[in-house]
Amino acid sequence: MDYPNLGKFARAAHEFAVYIASNAGSLINYGERFRSGERISLCLAESTVNAIISKRFAKRQQMQWTKRGAHLLLQTRTRTLDGTLRPMFERWYPGLANDHREGAAHAVAA
C-alpha cells in the first residue's frame, strides 16, 4: 500500500520524539502520580492559568508578556498558592523570617 502522508507523519513523529527526549526531566508522569495518590490536575487551576495566559498574550492588552515572563509568573503564582514561596525567600533572605513573625504578632494584637 502507498501512504501519501507517511513522510509527513514520520517527520512529526521524529520531532515529537526529540521533544520528549529534550524535556524528559520536566515532564510529569501522571500514571506515577495517580498510583501514589497525588493530584493529577485541578480544572480550576488550569482554567485560571489559561485565563491569565490568554489575557496577557492578547494583542489588545496594553501589557503583553513574553513566553519566558509568563512562565516565571506562573511559577511564582504556583509557589504562592502552594505555600512554598515565603519559605524560599526566607532561606534567601534570613531577615525576612523575623519580619514575618513580627507581622504576625502585630496582626494578633490588632
Image (cartoon, rainbow, N blue to C red):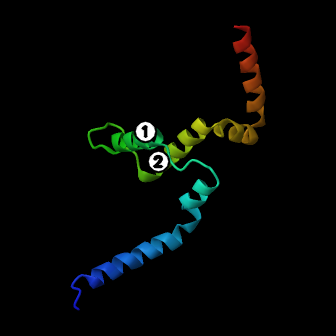
First in residue order: circle 1 vs circle 2: 1
- What kind of element bears circle 1? helix
Residue 1 figure quarter:
bottom left
Q: Is residue 17 visible?
A: yes
Instruction: Residue lying at the far top in this picture: please name it.
Output: 110
User: In the image, what residue occupies the spot 73% across and 26% down?
Assistant: 100
| Residue 40 on image: x %, y % | 53, 50
Instruction: Residue lying at the far bottom in this picture: please name it.
Output: 1
User: In the image, what residue occupies the spot 60% across and 60% down?
Assistant: 32
| Residue 94 on image: x %, y % | 78, 36
Work out whether 36 lies above or below 22.
above
Q: Residues within 10 Å of mark 1 (few under 14, many from 20)?
A: few
Q: Quadrant of the C terminus?
A: top right
Work out whether 87 lies above or below 32.
above
User: In the image, what residue occupies the spot 59% across and 36% down?
Assistant: 80
| Residue 71 on image: x %, y % | 48, 49
Image disc number at residue 28? none
Work out whether 107 lies above or below 60.
above
Specify whether 28 is left or right of 18: right
Specify whether 5 is left or right of 77: left
Give the residue type at disc 2. Answer: Gly
Image disc number at residue 69? 2
Residue 28 figure quarter:
bottom right
Q: Residues within 10 Å of mark 2 (few under 14, many from 20)?
A: few
Proximity of marks 1 and 2: CB atoms separated by less than 8 Å: no
Give the residue type at disc 1. Answer: Thr
**Mark 1 or mark 2, whichever is nearer to me:** 1
| Residue 57 on image: x %, y % | 34, 45
Residue 103 figure quarter:
top right
Instruction: Estimate the spatial distance between the alpha carbons at disc 1 and disc 2, rounded to whole Å.
Output: 17 Å
Residue at numbered disc 1: 48
